[in-house]
Amino acid sequence: MTIRTFQGVVYPAQCDAMGHMNVQHYVGVFDQATWHLFAACGYDSGWIEARREGWADVRQEIDYRQEVRAGELFVIDSAVRRVGGKSLTTWHRLSTARGVSAEMLAVTVYFDLAARRARELPDVVRVGALALLEPSPEDPAKVDRA
């Protein structure tokens, strides 16, 4: 299931010498959308301090489709594509009124901040992620226990 995870506007300071939003800002807004998606899965950001548990990005693939310019409004819609034992694969689509501008596929590992290693997804996150699972058009959604 795809959900709206972010909306924003491109400011001139976010644009590069060629007049479109610089790639560093795509990564930033996709990151913010990811936090909203994880919250929709049941993750509580208070766990960072209380439980010393968070997330570590291990892979990101971004396809840039068309430029986004200063002053343009955009939205990001997101979905869970795969639920692993210790990770989630997520998909994010950034769109403007002119259509799809970029898509990102990411793998993020649930992380023990003290031990600095991956840990099993909490049950509440797993259940929430499964409720948001949406198959990829190219590859059916996967659920792993590994």
Image (spheres, helix red, strand yellow):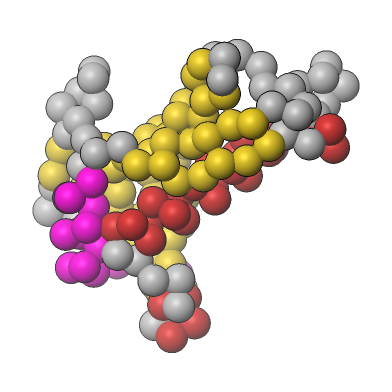
Q: Is residue 60 above or below residue 63?
A: below
**Horizontal arrangement in the rendering, residue 53 relative to residue 20 (left or right):** left
Which quadrant would residue 50 be assigned to in this image? bottom left
The one nearer the camera, 33 or 121, is 33
In the image, residue 119 lies at what x, y percent? Answer: 29, 67
| Residue in view at x 18 percent, y 68 percent | 123
| Residue in view at x 29 percent, y 58 percent | 41
- Asked whether residue 131 is drawn in magenta, I would say yes
In the image, residue 102 lies at what x, y percent? Answer: 53, 23
**Horizontal arrangement in the rendering, residue 143 relative to residue 43 (left or right):** left
| Residue in view at x 57 percent, y 14 percent | 98
- Asked whether residue 122 is drawn in magenta, I would say yes
The one nearer the camera, 103 or 87, is 103
| Residue in view at x 42 percent, y 36 percent | 77
Q: Is residue 50 above or below residue 5?
A: below
The one nearer the camera, 45 or 7, is 7
Which quadrant would residue 111 be assigned to in this image? bottom left
In the image, residue 135 lies at what x, y percent? Answer: 20, 30
Q: Which residues are magenta?
A: 116-132
- Quadrant of the image for the N terminus? top left
